[in-house]
Image (cartoon, rainbow, N blue to C red):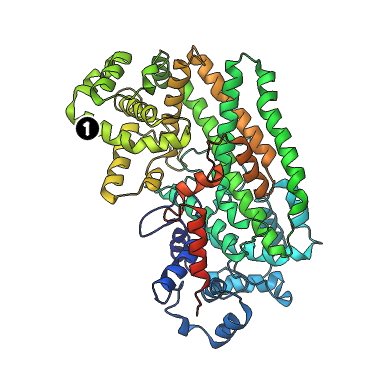
Amino acid sequence: MKKEDLMAYTELFIKCGSEEYIPCPQAYSPLYIRLYNALLSQHEPELLGIDCIESLPESTLEDINNRSTNPFDRYLMANYISPFELSYPLPIPEEDLKYQRLNQYLCFRYNKASQEPDNFKQDRAFKDVLSLFPIKHRETLGSKDNKKYLSSFFKLLTLNYKLSRVNEKWKDHARRASLSDHTHYHMDTIIAFNGLDSEVSKQASATFMTLYYELDQSSPDGKLQSSRNIAAIPSALDLIDFSVRDNLVKKWCEGLDDEERHEETVGSIKQCITSTHKKIETQIQYDDPHHHFCDVLRTAILCNSHYNKLLAKREFEDSIFKDDECEQVFRSLQKDMSWYVKPLGRAELTGLIMESIPNVKETLSNNTYNEQIWSIAKHLKPLLINRIPSLSDDAANNLSVLFVVLCKRKFPRIRGSLQGANRPYSLWKALKDGSSKINSDSLNLWEYESVYRPSLLHMMELVSLSVIWKSDKTINRFDQFVRLRKEILDSQITVNDILDGEHHRHILILANILTPQKEPVENEPVFERFWKKSDPEIQSLSKHVEEHMKRASLQWP
């Protein structure tokens, strides 16, 4: 299999349809969706790399029919063929659990150069993939004496070789970055699941999602372990971050000092974590070692990705606030703009923005720019609410318009720290390009996130928080804004550090506990957030169950 074929294979896992990029892990893998969409339409599902099911060897067909228990497992066996593949749903036979056999397979299937085993390289590769796991799980899962996970590690070594052919540094995006190593903090490269033109960003997302979905495909749904809910981890971690931010701001406003704020926020979350952990620790058991292996690693890489984004945000903010031109823009926002919460028409909002920031008058007076600004702001509004859920529609609209105006008139070009292409870029041009793609491709609301750089959307959040906190008197000066932002990110990083290696159910429960809920409660907050961004046609649990029942009645081949 050539490098080009492997690259095309990995890109399958970031596409939702033809050219649409998914913004976060979906409930089911693209291959799962491909199989059941075909069967529901009474078509034969397309296979990877072979023309049709009839072209498989007879022995393979026998294996598929005799050894697998459901249509999707049989579909995976037809696609991946070898037990050395991570997505192959059955374990590697014990007699084949030898590095020499693995080496032979890699040479045969992926053109590995030498069939001679190299013990040093084997140990290095093993330690390399083990570094993806949380430290607290490495001794248990990676022990040479613990043979029950050996089949899983051999499968992971195969995937490691495949993805390393695409990008030697793919693991940098899946493992947890070191606090002291700033070289990995790339705001626009760290997995954003977006459709940026950058091949670097696309490749980073593609290799990450291939790992996630190959782990997902090969392990059971795990009803007792709630394994299907691992896809909601990014939503849960967002809600935990919001809780840290909102509670810190509240304690800041109450006049507590640094230590008291830390104890009231991070300290109380630590207690909540300990309490939740005691409740569920004895309830989670795994009979299947591979299922346990996949659950731990899928949870870990999603937590690692989120943690790395927090480090990237902190590095990005430090850079932005030290930039003289950016600092001037943020200082210009240090005035009361409490009008941002009001329902305002175009003319009234335009007048208030010009009154608050006088030198944008020329931009807002130009009819061409004015229409562009309102069109772009309309696309940004739901993305801002996604980042600051407490905002009303009116407030989000007004802040989105203000941000777009600042990008057109005030903000300089910024560095998004895009790995391999770190030139400054124009926020205004990036906004226009994203809005144009939304309009030309008729993207759905849930896909908007995929067309804007993460650094651009983070700048929108910073501008909005600056206006909000100044207007409600949380802060009085720019230096206070910088200090509060740093304290929030430091605390979020600390909490995410504490969560490293925790079971996914623990993280989901914690997020639900920490999130205020409005009456009547229809869905748990984590899943409310998840369904808005994933599998858009299945917006509720009842619909999800209904779809599952349809699939359960189908057979293949």
Percent across and percent down for residue 18 are 36, 60
Q: Dot 1 corresponds to which residue?
A: 371
Percent across and percent down for residue 451 are 37, 44
Given residues 468 and 31, the one toward you in this image is 468
Residue 343 picture quarter: top left
Given residues 117 and 546, the one toward you in this image is 546
Say which residue appears at 75% left-offset and 45% top-offset: 279
Question: Given the current orientation, which residue lies at the most extreme bottom position?
Answer: 58
Question: Given the current orientation, which residue lies at the most extreme right position?
Answer: 145
Say which residue appears at 48% left-offset and 60% top-offset: 10
Given residues 214 and 322, the one toward you in this image is 214
How many numbered badges does the structure rendering display?
A: 1
Name the amino acid type tagged 1: Glu
Can residue 429 be seen in the rendering of this structure?
A: no
Can residue 238 be seen in the rendering of this structure?
A: yes
Question: Given the current orientation, which residue lies at the most extreme front position?
Answer: 520
Percent across and percent down for residue 312 are 53, 35
Say which residue appears at 46% left-offset and 85% top-offset: 54
Q: Secondary structure at mark 1?
A: helix
Judge the density around disc 1: few (<14), some (14-19), many (≥20) Cα neighbours within 10 Å.
few
Answer left or right for 278 relative to 399. right
Percent across and percent down for residue 321 are 48, 22
Answer left or right for 202 relative to 515. left
Residue 389, above or below 449 = above
Given residues 344 and 203, the one toward you in this image is 344
Residue 409, above or below 535 = above
